Amino acid sequence: EAGVAQSPRYKIIEKRQSVAFWCNPISGHATLYWYQQILGQGPKLLIQFQNNGVVDDSQLPKDRFSAERLKGVDSTLKIQPAKLEDSAVYLCASSSIQGTKNIQYFGAGTRLSVL
Amino acid sequence: AQSVAQPEDQVNVAEGNPLTVKCTYSVSGNPYLFWYVQYPNRGLQFLLKYITGDNLVKGSYGFEAEFNKSQTSFHLKKPSALVSDSALYFCAVRGYNNAGNMLTFGGGTRLMVKP
């Protein structure tokens, strides 16, 4: 079974530029999560989708961050414009709504450096 | 709101010795608790979980965790550490949002196993 795929693995941009990250969850997983992991900290949930609907975006900085999962499969997270404090690893995870529904499976992440 | 504390930034242990990585939590209702491991430049990998039942939970790679309700703790243990266990370990508790399945992570503990 293929895992959660994320791209790119690394991205370096200058502040005020825009950037987008892509995630393809495990096949059949209805729930998809985006986390931000700042160096030295645990992951923090940014947004959670179930199928193509948002179920929690309370910690997403909506003035600059946006995310979509239009067809209920893959997802894109965008930052526009980026700030220095956005430097972090952005992790995507997915989980099933049945069976092992309590387990989230993570991708390798995208490491963003904002200069 | 739920929270997780990992009081040790780093744990050092010699190969072959037992290891313990500490975690305490705060959550309303019955806790769903998880341990994940993160190797360099990799995403988080699920190790084990406690939902209900026996207080001692066994997981991957020989790890186990002991749930203690009175002390609100969920310490990760392994009887004999390996050098390859050196990694970053995260404890997490399931909280409740609209979908009922969000994770709140601790800050992480770096485990260093020396030969």
Image: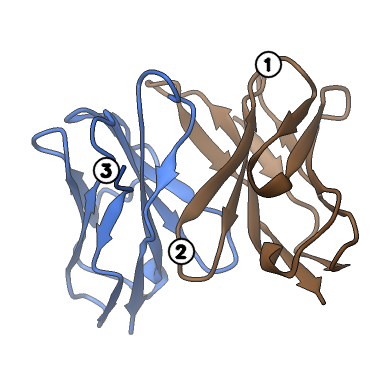
Three-letter amino acid code at the position of disc 2 = Arg
Q: Nearer the viewer, residue A66 or A1?
A: A1
In this rendering, is residue A10 above or below B77?
Answer: below
Please check whether the numbered discs 3 and 2 fall on a single chain. no
The chain identifier of the residue carrying mark 3 reads A
Tell me which corner region of the image, top left, top right, bottom left or bottom right, holds residue A97: top left
Residue type indicated by callout 1: Thr
Point out the image quarter for the C terminus of chain A.
bottom left
Q: Give percent across and percent down for residue B82.
A: 76, 64
Please state which amino acid type lies under the numbered disc 3: Pro
**Callout 1: residue from which chain?**
B
Mark 3 touches mark 2? (CB < 8 Å): no
Position of A22 compared to B18: left or right?
left
* Residue B109 position (above or below residue B101): below
- Element class at badge 1: loop
Q: Residue at x 72, y 14 (%)?
A: B53
Q: What residue did someone put label 2 on?
A: B42
Seen in the picture, residue B6 relative to A108 is either above or below; the reply is above
User: Which residue is at 35% across, 78% downward?
Assistant: A113
Describe the element under mark 3 as helix, strand or loop.
loop
The hue of chain A in the figure is blue
Tag 3 residue: A25
The mark that comes first in sequence, 1 or 2, is 2
The letter of the brown chain is: B
Task: Report the residue at 15% width, 33% height from top.
Answer: A72
Q: Residues within 10 Å of mark 1 (few under 14, many from 20)?
A: few
Mark 2, Cα crowd under 10 Å, few <14 / some 14-19 / many 20+, is: some
Residue that carries the numbered disc 1 in the rendered image:
B52
Helix, strand or loop for disc 2: loop
Q: Residue B30, percent across and down?
A: 67, 16
Colouring used for the render: by chain
